[in-house]
Image: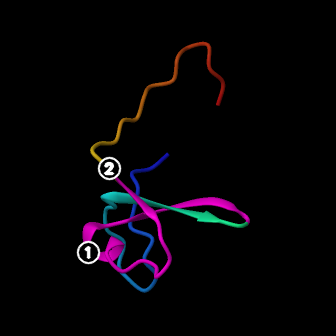
């Protein structure tokens, strides 16, 4: 997994700081956005989770690729 990037269409790649989650009829959807773009991501209600860090764990010797 790579560090999350803002998923706002039409912008240059930049780091995400929030995870936005929508409850849709088809199921729950989560996308990553920066602080600025998360303010106006959607007119419908959503949950915002603040990303406080990113941890990439090393694979154990018993794990396969």
Q: Residue at x 44, y 25 (%)?
A: 58
2 relative to 24, above or below: above
What label sits on residue 51 in the rendered view?
2
The number of callouts visible is 2
Mark 1 falls on what kind of element?
Answer: helix
**Circle 1 Cα neighbour tier, 10 Å, few/some/many (<14 / 14–19 / ≥20):** few
Residues 28 and 10: in front is: 28
**Circle 2 Cα neighbour tier, 10 Å, few/some/many (<14 / 14–19 / ≥20):** some
Q: In this picture, which residue range is highlighted in magenta? A: 26-49
59 relative to 61, above or below: below
* Residue at the right extreme of this rendering: 26
Q: Is residue 4 left or right of residue 15?
A: right
Q: Is residue 8 left or right of residue 29?
A: left
Q: Residue at x 30, y 58 (%)?
A: 17
Percent position of residue 6, x then y: 39, 67
Q: Which residue is mark 1?
A: 36
Q: CA distance from mark 1 to mark 2?
A: 14 Å
Percent position of residue 60, x then y: 52, 17
Residues 46 and 1: in front is: 46
Q: Is residue 48 magenta?
A: yes
Percent position of residue 62, x then y: 61, 13
32 relative to 61, above or below: below
Percent position of residue 25, x then y: 71, 67
Residue 15 sits in quarter: bottom left
């Amino acid at each position: 997994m790579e560090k999350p990037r803002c998923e706002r269409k039409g912008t240059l790649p930049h780091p995400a700081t929030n995870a936005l989650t929508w409850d849709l009829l088809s199921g729950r959807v989560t996308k990553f956005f920066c602080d600025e773009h998360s303010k106006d991501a959607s007119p419908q209600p959503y949950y915002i989770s603040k990303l406080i860090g990113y941890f990439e764990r090393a694979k154990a010797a018993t794990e396969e690729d």
